[in-house]
Image (spheres, rainbow, N blue to C red):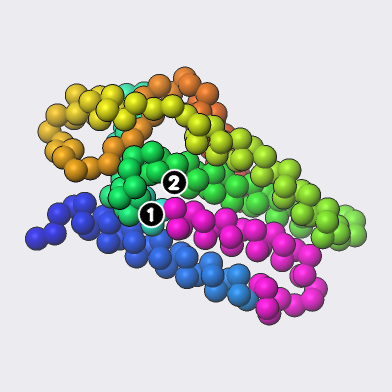
Amino acid sequence: MWELSEIFLISNSFVTTTGCLVNLFLLYIVLFHSPRIIKTFSIVIVNLAITNLGACLSGFLIGQRIIPSGKRLFYISYGLCSNLGPQFCFDVFGALLHFHTHALWLVFLSFAYRYYVMLRNEPSRLTLQLSIAIIYIPSLIQLFAMFYQEMNFEEIRFLLNDAYPQYDLTGLTVTGAVDALRFAPLYTLIHMTVITQSSGVIRI
């Protein structure tokens, strides 16, 4: 019988690999077969496809399981990143979260674009590119905050073992956020909550 971790890793690998292939196909269609009438808006689609491709690739590399414990979050990485150590896995996780938030910002921009062209002339490609650069700033701040967050991985492993002594952590790559009030986890939590909830409202 397969263990639960093996089933999870296989499922995660299948889903993320499929996501990579779908977004690569979307990029090909947009770059080489877009109708001339949507050439400007295709900038948004290309950015969204690249962002989703980055998210799928990050998800494939970390194969991550999240374990909550009170105000703490622990992450166990089963993916290929574990071969390069916990810091690399945590950096890939930070990249994944920033891809997620930027994708939602691009959803905002796509709605704003469609509303704008109903009232005025289509914006220039440069204007759209500058808009994408501006909405990327919050996600970029989040990425750097995650990258430069200091962590004691031995302490994190000890706290997880203390919270869940029944877990066998031997050979596993463990990272986490043990102080939710520090800038990086707090900013990330607020940013992701606001953008996710707002995106849900807009789609409704």
Residue 72 visible, this angle:
no
Q: What kind of residue is marked 1?
A: Leu
Q: Which residue is mark 2?
A: 92
Q: Please tell me whether residue 98 is drawn above or below residue 164 in the rendered image.
A: below
Q: Is residue 21 left or right of residue 198?
A: left
User: Where residue 70 appears, x then y in whole percent?
Assistant: 32, 24
Magenta stretch: dominant secondary structure: helix
Could you tell me if the residues under marks 2 and 1 are in contact, i.e. CB atoms within 8 Å? yes
- Residue 141, quarter of picture: top right
**Residue sitting nearer the eye, 4 or 142:** 142
Residue stretch rendered in magenta on the structure: 30-58
- Residue 154, quarter of picture: top left
Disc number placed over residue 61 in the picture, else none: 1
| Residue at 28% over, 24% down | 155
User: Where residue 157 appears, x then y in whole percent?
Assistant: 25, 30
Q: Please tell me whether residue 132 is drawn above or below residue 124 in the rendered image.
A: above
Q: What kind of residue is marked 2?
A: Val
Residue 42 highlighted magenta (yes or no)? yes
Residue 187 visible, this angle:
yes
| Residue at 72% over, 50% down | 132
| Residue at 58% over, 60% down | 50
- Residue 140, quarter of picture: top right
